[in-house]
Amino acid sequence: MITTADPGRSTRKREDPAERSRIMRAVKSRDTAPELRVRRIAHRMGFRFSLRRADLPGKPDLALPKYRAAIFVHGCFWHGHRCRRGARAPKTNAEYWRGKIARNRTRDRRVAAELRARGWRVLAIYECQLRREAAVAKRIEKFLRRSQGSTAQVRLSF
Ligand SMILES: [Zn+2]
């Protein structure tokens, strides 16, 4: 599903291998957008998920129907995370950005409430937390384990 462009194909044929691998690394790091990294973590742990399911409130970045669990990956700035990056305030149009971020946060809360009302559980992962990938993996696992035996399963078992 994810295609990686090959930057070397036409124009960089004569580059030495070191330079080439430097470029490939650069391309790679562009692919490690927070959402992609969370997908990779969940995938590595063997969880099956679907992406941005349109039938769920907020189109969660990852939805795991088996666990009735939704995972959102949030950019710290856009979602007003309480961290250094989230606190960074642009100097121009400060008012505009403040409003925008406040609206995002309101929507995040509303979406989470709607999902919970449908019996889904919600986990939000912020991009700054991905600096510690192992910790994120642990959190996802804990979150999903807790989801097992949730109301959905109880309802199905009678
Ligand atoms: Zn953050």
Image (cartoon, rainbow, N blue to C red):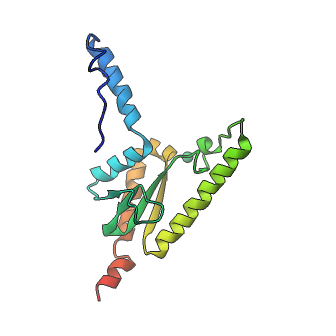
In terms of image quadrants, where is residue 36? top left
Specify the farthest residue to the bottom.
Answer: 158
In terms of image quadrants, where is residue 145? bottom left
Which residue is found at the position 38% from the left and 26% from the top?
26
Q: Position of residue 58 (x, y in %)?
A: 48, 61
Q: Position of residue 16 (x, y in %)?
A: 28, 11
Q: Where is residue 121 in the image (x, y as percent from the top left)?
A: 44, 68
Q: In this view, does 79 lie to the left or right of 151?
A: right
| Rendered view: 122 above or below 41 | below
Which residue is found at the position 55% from the left and 60% from the top?
108
Which residue is found at the position 69% from the left and 51% from the top?
99
Q: Position of residue 122 (x, y in %)?
A: 46, 64
In terms of image quadrants, where is residue 56? bottom left
| Rendered view: 62 above or below 22 | below
Q: In this view, does 95 lie to the left or right of 140?
A: right
Quadrant including the C terminus: bottom left
Q: Is residue 113 left or right of residue 66?
A: right
**In the image shown, does 71 or 57 lie closer to the viewer?**
57
Which residue is found at the position 42% from the left and 70% from the top?
120
Quadrant including the N terminus: top left
Q: Is residue 107 left or right of residue 7?
A: right
